[in-house]
Image (tube, coloured by chain):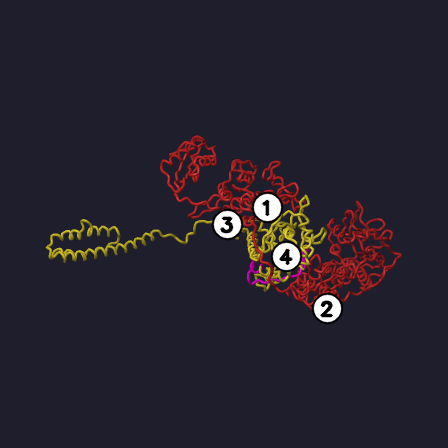
Chain colours: A yellow, B red
Amino acid sequence: MELMEKLRHLSEVIPAKIAVLDNVAALEELRVSVLGKKGELTAILRGMGALNPTDRPRVGQLANEVRDQIEAALEDKKTALTATELVHKQQQERIDVTLPGRQIYHAHVHPLSRIIDEATEIFLGLGFSVAEGPEIESEYYNFEALNVPPLHPARDMQDSFYLREGWVMRTQTSPVQVRVMQALSPHHPIRIISPGKVYRRDDDATHSPMFHQIEGLVIDKGVSLAHLKSILLMFARQMFGAEREIRLRPSYFPFTEPSAEVDVSCGTCGGRGCRVCKGTGWVEILGCGMVHPSVLSMSGYDPEVVSGFAFGMGVERIAMLKYNVDDLRHFFVNDYRFIRQF
Amino acid sequence: MKVSLDWLKQIIAVEQTATEIAAMLTHAGIAVDAVNKVSLASEQADELFNDEVLELDLTPNRADCQSILGVAYEVAALTGKTVALPDGVSVGTALASSPHLSVEVQAPSLCSGYLGLVLDVSLGESPIWLKNRLESVGLRPVNNVVDITNFVMWEMGQPLHAFDYDRIAGKRLTIRESVMGESITLIDGAARELPQGALVIADDKCALAIAGVMGGQGSEVSGSTRRIVLESALFDRTSIRRTARALGLRTEASLRFDKGVDPSGIKGALQRAVHLFQSLGVGQILGECVGVEPVYCSYRHVSLRPERANSLLGIDLRPAEMDTILMRLGMPTEVHGDCRVVSVPSRRGDITQEVDLVEEIGRMHGFHNVPISTLRGDVTQGRLTEDQRMSRSLRRTLLSLGVDEVITASFYDPDNAIKFMLPERHAFRSAVALANPLSRDRSELRPTLMPSMVGVLGYNQVRQVSGMSLFELGTVYLPHADKPLEQQNLCLGAFGVREGNWIEQSAHLDFFYLKGLVEVLLPGAQYIASQEPFLHLTRQAEIWHAGTSVGYIGEIHPLIGLKERTVVAEIAVASILHSLFGKPLYRGISSSIAVKRDIAFVVDESISAADILASIRQAGGERLSSATLFDVYVGSSTPLGSRSIAIRLEFVPLGGTSFTEAELSVMLGKIRSELELAFGVTWRA
């Protein structure tokens, strides 16, 4: 039984050869030499016809077994080699993952815009709308309608820029509030904020002739100082942090009465007193008060029927506190080393 | 206003420390900025006189606190202690005539009270305690007469003035308005022309003093003075304020008159001064007090509804508690039904209506005692207007495109006309002028954002930055017949490169970078070569959109003096908003795949890309979905004066079918022959 011997030989020799191969190409070569048209096993199978019929089933069975065994070994080896080669290929493609990425420039919003956006979001959430108006105003809207008649000492507090034609650069965004009041009086309630540029004739380390303000106005029946406090507390906590407190100190503005300055507890020292808050534990952030009855009635509301509160803050001041900016002038110089920090 | 604690304690017996008083006052609305310790000389040579001084930052309504006495009333209200009037102040003393002096008030509307008293004085130095008082609050001791007047002003809030009696011509004081061309030499030695209508104190010859502002040299108390006239008067606030401003003189006296002095105080101040003259042995009265007494009410009646005070403040005080608060402020109340009638003393000139009393109750009760209560009422929808929403989107779009935001001042320098080589009548030369500018370079309002942008870019160019791309959204101010117009503009500016790295190439922030930004903001705009004097002769264009000129783009002119090539664009925001952020409408996506074909040709360089693309689009018809210019080449293979251009064409078949080669070549042929015909192009392989 020469054929049987050959088959047994193949079943020993071929798997041993497969085991030592290390690439897919050589494996394929081996497969062809055994199982290909001219392969050794193929030749044996072809030679089966010459066997006597009694031997044929035995030899045939063995031949099939050997073929299956070799095919399985080839397949296993191929799978193993492919995996190894893929690993090898990836090893060849190694990169230094610590190299910097492609340059993608992300732009910087100006810190004042950032504060205005943030404050706007806060007040939109509290049901306020945003009102805007001209920067060039009449004296009526900037002063008279806000309870500051000509020669009132309060006009000294805010020396203003005038145009040659007699117009005034608004010294606060309150004229916008007057326009809204005139449009909505005598019945409609109001909840607005008015952000924008304002102008005062002042120029030193702590004053810029142009700066930004956000003012707020609420008018409705039964509005009180207690409501003002709650709105300001919500604002201060959202703007500066949930742990902050506020306090109101009585003050004076012609368009509100009672009036107050509002301090927020110092974020640097948590209220214990430090250099930022000059040891007081508090920093001033805005002015506010109950809308003066004369302001209400000048704009068409009946102060016996409705009341209101107003508040106003300097955006630069809020930005300086929030971002630790030490010099007001940075905001308008626009040095790249400044604006790229925001 | 400076308040000496020791002085204050002479008037009110407070036990609190200076710091405690400062805190109390601050929480009641009299802001104390600082508490400073002072050490001065004392009668005992080896000891110092120690005191503490409160620096008040008074709001303009609290004229009453411009004196130690006024602050004492406030402290009394806060502590419940009582005020003891300074020695010498009493009620009574009627006016009489005097052989020594007569007073004539010719301007009664500007001077509602004027008291004059003649005294024999012996001039000398003040005692140390008096000098200390003055020095502790920042006043300079001069001589015993002047020191007493200053002392009384600080203590009582009523400015006094002393004239040298023997230098008054005719022994008659006339209070009148100044006449045209009148002048006076003041005690500071300066001769000043008086503004017409300024209130003056004059003798028979000339003006001796500017009422309520400053005395004149001619009647100044000096070494030779033997007799004085002591003046205590009530001058009109507005008049004093106007005169002081016109002359640029802010004196302690003018500040007090400007804010308003207590009409009931003029006699008391005179009495207090006389008491000091006598008790210090400085002077004796010579004759009676002469002049005009002011007419005033000691108390003003203001009504208050306790319920209204509670509802405005959001508190719940009983009316009796309000009575107590008001009583401590020296304001007795009387019940009239639901209402209180409150008697307000004349020193509190700021309290004239109910809301003023509400404020008094609020600040005395303490704003910290006002509860926090949530705003109620109808639910309101907080929202942005369409324009506000779009402006925000514009800013976010620019940021997402990698452009940094800047904010610059609205002021404008008329010399920009020179810097930017603007000819007569150029739009950027007609700016709105300020009547009272801070300086020439900020004397107008900007009609363009460009100079500010160039300023910021130039500033950064000399500070070692490789490149920047910036935008500003701001108002420009355009002169107009009645009121100047305000318009929102967008200014873009860039220079240099955005630096690459080991893997990324540097990107140039040049004209075509900026134009790329504008193309995002204004799709479909046209660019027409323009002639702005401040831009590079051949690298600039006017931007047209929807049939109107909306701005310009270009490289800054080389003569403008920037270190680097710099590009700017300025566009009216209104033109951008609706084209970019209007409501998008879905147009449907073709199910067929687009077919791409490239064409390349050589063409005369005078033919603009815009013309070539327009003509291709025209010839391509509706099935040509896009034509993209992807290459421009000038080199050895292109004839002189011409350039090679390559364009990628994309065709989309209609109705979900696909093109046959024949159809494609018909469409391409049409485009090719159009280009040959219109521009004489020659084809490249």
- In the depicted view, which residue is nearer to us: B186 or B373? B373
Q: Mark 3 vs mark 4: give the one in front.
A: 4
Residue B23 in the image, given as x and y percentages of width and height: 66, 64
Distance CA(mark 3)–CA(mark 1):
22 Å
According to the picture, the residue beneath numbered tag 2 turns out to be: B81
Where, by quadrant of the figure, is residue A258 drawn?
Answer: bottom right
User: Can the viewer see residue A101?
Assistant: yes
According to the picture, the residue beneath numbered tag 4 turns out to be: A219
Of mark 3 and mark 4, the one earlier in the sequence is 3
Mark 2 neighbour density, 10 Å: few (under 14) some (14–19) many (20 or more)? some
According to the picture, the residue beneath numbered tag 3 turns out to be: A107
- In the depicted view, which residue is nearer to us: B615 or A335? B615
Give the residues drawn in magenta, as a range: A235-257
The three-letter amino acid code for the residue at tag 4 is Ile
Quick check: marks 3 and 1 in contact, CB under 8 Å?
no
**Of all residues shown, which one is farthest toward the bottom?**
B15
Mark 3 neighbour density, 10 Å: few (under 14) some (14–19) many (20 or more)? many
Instruction: Check residue B475 in the rendering and tell me which mark sits there, or answer none.
Output: 1
Mark 4 neighbour density, 10 Å: few (under 14) some (14–19) many (20 or more)? many
Left-right relation of A279 to B212: left
Left-right relation of A17 to B397: left
- Secondary structure of the residue carrying tag 2 is loop
Q: Mark 3 vs mark 1: give the one in front.
A: 1
